[in-house]
Amino acid sequence: MSRTRRPGSSPGAAITSSPWVLVAIGVIVMVVLLVVALGSVRDRRTFPAAGPSDPAMSLPGLPASTSAPSGVPSAPPSTAARPVVPGLSPRSTVLPAAPTSVAPTGSPRGGGRPAPPPPPSAVTGRYAVVNSFDGGFIGEVRLVNAGDAAQGWTVRLTFPGGRLVTAWVQGAEQGTFGFADGVFTYRSGVDLAAGASVPVQFHIERAGSRPASCTVDGVTCAGL
């Protein structure tokens, strides 16, 4: 009896029948190629090794001064000034002081004229004693405005050692008065009309009936 021999399977047929074997072989080949490529890259130098530096080249020195050729005018020296910081002097760092105003003075030769004195007041006064009694008296200064316009006034009398009891303007608007160190002062409340007259009266004690001084706007009273 003869036996029939089956044909055996070849290795190539086994590989082709298993696709995973091909994939595994391909992966192994790729890994080997990657390792070889990395090794070659590490051994390669990207930049050349630094060698000895080239010697520096020295430039030829320029002459200190060059003379212009004959017949050619030389350029004038630069006169441009250095920039200066605003507000500061190039020679000093001290700021200038603010200018001070000087009052004009008259000429030493008399060329300047002095200011004229103010005109005298148009209001004048006359002193009189209205009533006298033991220890005191009542006096008055009668004011008259001889000017053409209404004007204020100030009466001032001096009674050394005296004492003022009271003061008033008879029949007119009252003003303000005071008494200090024997000096009696009365200032008008309203201006005195042109051509009008008004008496300023006062009660003084412990003083003589004749004052040491009496003025109206600085002018001495009449009647003393």
Image: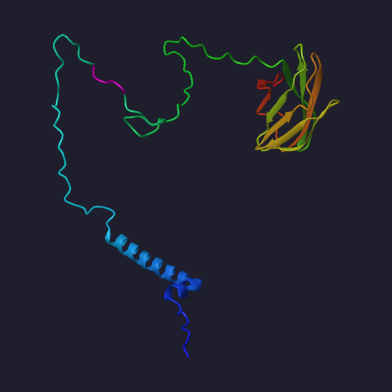
Residue in the foreground of this view, choosing between 39 and 167: 39
Residue in the foreground of this view, choosing between 11 and 149: 11
Q: Label the magenta part by its dominant secondary structure.
A: loop
Q: Is residue 123 left or right of residue 41?
A: right
Q: Quadrant of the C terminus?
A: top right
Q: Give the quarter of the image for residue 203.
A: top right
Q: Residue at position x 18%, y 52% from top?
A: 51
Q: Is residue 56 above or below residue 132?
A: below
Boundaries of the magenta span: 76-80
Q: Reply yes or no: does residue 165 show up in magenta.
A: no
Q: Residue furthest right?
A: 171
Residue 125 position, x and y percent, is 73, 20
Q: Is residue 43 left or right of residue 133?
A: left
Q: Is residue 198 left or right of residue 17?
A: right
Q: Give the quarter of the image for residue 161.
A: top right
Q: Residue at position x 71%, y 31% from top?
A: 185
Q: Give the quarter of the image for residue 82.
A: top left
Q: Reply yes or no: does residue 79 show up in magenta.
A: yes
Q: Residue at position x 72%, y 35% from top?
A: 178
Residue 143 position, x and y percent, is 77, 20
Number of marks drawn: 0
Q: Residue furthest bottom?
A: 1
Residue 152 position, x and y percent, is 74, 22
Residue in the foreground of this view, choosing between 12 and 95: 12
Q: Which colouring convention does the figure follow?
A: rainbow
Q: Is residue 224 above or below residue 16?
A: above
Q: Residue furthest front?
A: 1
Q: Is residue 200 above or below residue 17?
A: above
Residue 160 position, x and y percent, is 65, 35
Q: Residue at position x 42%, y 13% from top?
A: 108
Residue in the foreground of this view, choosing between 141 and 22: 22
